[in-house]
């Protein structure tokens, strides 16, 4: 154990060479669609997005009800928000962030195994696209790597979004460290309870998801590791592995936290961004598709965190790093 800690510390010391990118995402609070805002507030939001080179915002617009609907009263100001983003921050994709607790072994809220529920989810998605949203961002949890219903939902949603020239993105848990371990967990552990089979995507499942969507956001945060070097290794490893695995197929956002996790002395925004940059350094070549970080979340990110993000992640204003994402109109 001491050797592992020492090795991680030595690995962590060199300053990363990689610069950040201009393709980045932000998870945003529900109040943007559920409560009224002034024109000045919309302008301030647009200025924040542009200053921090945020290209995609996942505005929380759900959650889904058990039948796949979202009451209109929950997003009564969504159309006004989307119009303001398009007016004051042109080029930024405002996506409807929708999800729910997936029913597993009788526990949860929404049962995606029921075809009628999936059909209603698609109808709800269409209603949000009618409001002007640039895409649909799913966050269903838990998702296990044998979840055929989830893949079927992605197939249907992709048909909907691409028919309208919009984006489909999905948030997933951090992938497995060892795919072989998943079969052991599945055989020995239940899917619910304190000691449960962890819902981690295997390489094969992640490839299947990537073939069906335009963007994948990996929820890399909440690592619960005791040192900064180990937490940094975690972010580096998932950055490198995910970009090598699907970075040529789909835009990847690596999730970084601005909230205070349980072990905030080890895991914080600075450590996460440094780890992501180390992971990029270790790539043999850059991926073919755009990539960046996903900031979680706007309601926990203050001026100090945004300043730290700009200083440690963004490239200089005159430096362009990688292509920017566009709507998938040419697919």
Image (spheres, grey):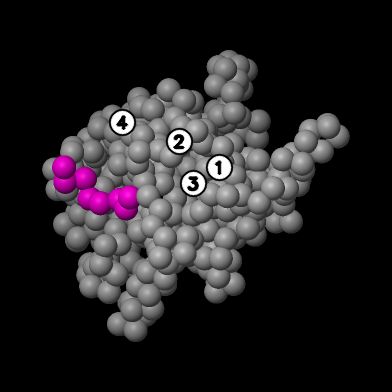
> Which residue is nearer to you in this view: 41 or 112?
41
Question: Callout 1: few (<14), some (14-19), or many (20+) C-alpha neighbours within 10 Å?
Answer: some
Residue in the image at 29% along x and 70% along y: 89
Residue 285: assigned label: 2
Q: Tell me the CA gap for discs 3 and 4.
A: 18 Å
Q: Are marks 2 and 3 in contact (CB under 8 Å)?
A: no
Determine if the magenta segment contains residue 204: no
Camera-nearest label, 2 or 3? 2
Instruction: Answer left or right for 40 relative to 119.
Output: right
**The residue tagged with tag 2: helix, strand or loop?**
loop
Q: Does residue 273 show up?
A: yes
Residue pointed to by mark 4: 211
Camera-nearest label, 1 or 3? 1
Residue pointed to by mark 1: 281
Comes first in the chain, label 2 or label 4? 4
**The residue tagged with tag 3: helix, strand or loop?**
strand
Residue pointed to by mark 3: 254
Q: Quadrant of residue 138?
A: top left
Q: Quadrant of residue 93?
A: bottom left
Point out the stretch of residues depicted in magenta.
323-330
> Which residue is nearer to you in this view: 30 or 231?
231
Please provide percent x and percent y for residue 308. 58, 66
Q: Tell me the CA gap for discs 1 and 3.
A: 15 Å
Residue in the image at 32% along x and 53% along y: 324
Q: Does residue 171 show up?
A: no
Comes first in the chain, label 3 or label 4? 4
């Amino acid at each position: 154990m001491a050797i592992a800690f020492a090795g991680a510390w030595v690995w962590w010391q060199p300053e990363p060479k990689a610069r950040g990118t201009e393709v980045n995402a932000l998870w945003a609070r529900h109040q943007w669609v559920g409560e009224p805002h002034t024109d000045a507030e919309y302008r301030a939001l647009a200025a924040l997005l542009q200053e921090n080179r945020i290209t995609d915002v996942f505005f929380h617009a759900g959650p889904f009800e058990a039948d796949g609907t979202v009451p209109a009263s929950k997003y009564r100001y969504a159309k006004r928000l989307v119009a303001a983003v398009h007016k004051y921050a042109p080029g930024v994709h405002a996506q409807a962030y929708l999800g729910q607790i997936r029913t597993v072994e009788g526990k949860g809220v929404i049962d995606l195994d029921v075809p009628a529920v999936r059909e209603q989810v698609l109808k709800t998605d269409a209603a949000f696209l009618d409001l002007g949203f640039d895409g649909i961002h799913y966050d269903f949890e838990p998702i296990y790597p044998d979840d055929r219903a989830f893949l079927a939902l992605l197939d249907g949603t992709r048909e909907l979004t691409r028919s309208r020239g919009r984006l489909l993105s999905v948030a997933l848990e951090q992938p497995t460290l060892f795919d072989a371990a998943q079969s052991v967990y599945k055989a020995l552990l239940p899917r619910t309870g304190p000691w449960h089979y962890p819902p981690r995507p295997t390489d094969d499942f992640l490839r299947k998801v990537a073939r069906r969507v335009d963007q994948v956001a990996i929820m890399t945060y909440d690592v619960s590791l005791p040192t900064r070097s180990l937490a940094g290794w975690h972010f580096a490893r998932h950055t490198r592995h995910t970009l090598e695995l699907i970075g040529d197929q789909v835009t990847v956002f690596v999730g970084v936290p601005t909230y205070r996790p349980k072990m905030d002395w080890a895991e914080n925004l600075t450590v996460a961004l440094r780890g992501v940059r180390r992971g990029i350094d270790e790539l043999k070549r850059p991926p073919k598709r755009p990539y960046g970080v996903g900031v979680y979340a706007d309601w926990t990110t203050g001026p100090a965190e945004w300043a730290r993000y700009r200083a440690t992640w963004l490239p200089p204003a005159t430096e362009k790093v990688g292509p920017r994402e566009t709507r998938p109109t040419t697919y």
